[in-house]
Amino acid sequence: MHLELSKDTFFTRGGILDTLLDNTFDQAIAVDKDERIIFFSKSSQLFSGLLPEQAIGKHIGEEVANHKFTEVLRTGVADKGSLLVLRDKVAIANHIPVIDKGEIIGAIGIVFFSSLSTVNKLISELSTTRSKEYFEMYNKIARRESSYTFQDFIGNSDIVKNLLANAKSAANSNYPILLIGETGTGKEILANAIHSENKHTFLQPFVKINCSAIPNNLLESELFGYEKGAFTGAFSTKIGKFEMANNGSILLDEIGEMDILLQTKLLRVLEEKEFERVGGSKLIPTNARVIALTNANLPTLCREKKFREDLYYRLNTLEIYVPPLRARMEDIPLLVEYFINSGKLNIKLKKDAIKALMQYNWPGNVRQLKNVINRFGVLKHNQVIGAEDVFAVLSQSPLNSFAAAHKTAYLLEATQISNEKAIASPQSLENIEKTAIERVLQDCNYNQVAAAKTLKIARTTLIRKIKKYNIQASL
Ligand SMILES: Nc1ncnc2c1ncn2[C@@H]1O[C@H](COP(=O)(O)OP(=O)(O)OP(=O)(O)O)[C@@H](O)[C@H]1O
Ligand SMILES: [Mg+2]
């Protein structure tokens, strides 16, 4: 398949061709044979935040990853249904060569699904047929969604170095991981990075679900799927996130919000590694690795009987605390530089501005800092920013009054925890090791030979570590 267009029509375009490209597809981009962008539809701008005048003239590779233009321009053969990544957003596209009297003069990329939720919806509707092709497509998309690695978590303070070391050690085991931290501290980046770091999961699906965004009565069927006829409206069988995440990881965001009855089912899944769909009786095995996130104080919720203690203990084998930004202010200069560069912002911050940023308490953490820098990028484009600009922006922050009015107690408590944890953090790697050994010993019924084998260490090393950590060695 190709488009037969004269050079004139293709390069001057206008009229019906532009109208069609602008309005018929989710996005459209045209390149000349040197892969320079010559057309960038208005809809592409909505999707990528890039204005046509910023895009036109650029080499396609600067803005779009994974594109197939090079191949299509070389071979003159269209590419259909490939994933295209535009500024971190994923879309499904066709790349079609444009040919004038036998000569390849350029190509057009048209995007059908610029929203992954459309694709997800489509796939979940089709998933009951268990079409291999669609599962593969889903996996491809899921993989792209977890594109973060540990390098994307910016910071060079000792706290961050420790955090990343702990998270990397945890990543390579198969135990559930619990990431605890205030809003905006980067838990989701870390969860992605953990999935990408683990050699068993990185090529497998990474499936996310936010337990607070879905009403509890629907959450169960989202997590575990349902059988046809399970309830009114269940016209066909639907698989749940646990099945989609098989072999890979499932991210349970805001786990503290999960209904207590559902917590019971989740606990059983973690222990038995199998579950039933809603309305079903068949046991379905799962080996999805659970990564749970929360900004709630789970021990308090356990005391209040809102969170099952046994589930908490099952999840916290590998508990990682993600400290708030105010506990690692020395990371601010690096984060600021990172946000300016990655957002291609044309601003400069004076030393006193950085100092002012380092004195704020950041209730919204890194997310709030990123927003402040982006705000400067828009409001102070081409300018040098001083401390007074920082104070002006921060005093307008809705989080400021929010923090003052509603969150003082919480923040005070969180700061105390963070300080304690910060002091204790050099121990955390050892803690992880200790907990892992305890858990494996338990799982192996305290058979040290089996436990050493599972842990891939010599038995003598195991015995040494049991002594070192004063671990219970037998029943
Ligand atoms: N260390 C970091 N380096 C770079 N960017 C970061 C870092 N931490 C957070 N961010 C940015 O801050 C934003 C929020 O991060 P993320 O979604 O991971 O936070 P979270 O802890 O999951 O918050 P919430 O509990 O509100 O969901 C994202 O835009 C992310 O890119
Ligand atoms: Mg999050």
Image (tube, helix red, strand yellow):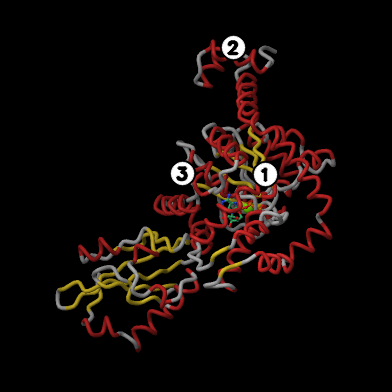
Q: Nearer the viewer, residue 437 or 341?
A: 341
**Between marks 2 and 1, how big is the CA–CA gap?**
33 Å
Q: Secondary structure at mark 1?
A: loop
Position above or below: 49 against 67:
below
Under mark 1, the amino acid is Pro
Q: Is mark 1 within 8 Å of ligand 1?
A: no
Residue at which label 3 appears: 204
Q: Are marks 3 and 1 in contact (CB under 8 Å)?
A: no
Instruction: Identify the residue position indicated by label 1 in the image.
Output: 323
Circles 3 and 2 in contact, beta carbons < 8 Å: no
Q: Residue at x 82, y 53 (%)?
A: 408
Amino acid on which disc 3 is placed = Gln
Q: Image check: 426 left or right of 168?
A: right
Q: Which residue is mark 2?
A: 463
**Visible residue check, residue 285:** no
Give the answer, above or below, for where 378 lies relative to 468. below
**Which mark is first along the chain, 1 or 2?**
1
Mark 2 secondary-structure assignment = helix
Label 3 vs 1, first from the N-terminus = 3
Relative to 110, 402 lies left or right: right
Q: Which is more N-terminal, label 2 or label 3?
A: 3
- Callout 1 environment at 10 Å: few (<14), some (14 to 19), or many (20+)? many
Q: Position of residue 55 (x, y in %)?
A: 39, 72
Which residue appears farthest toward the left when viewing the image? 102
Front residue of 402/258: it is 402
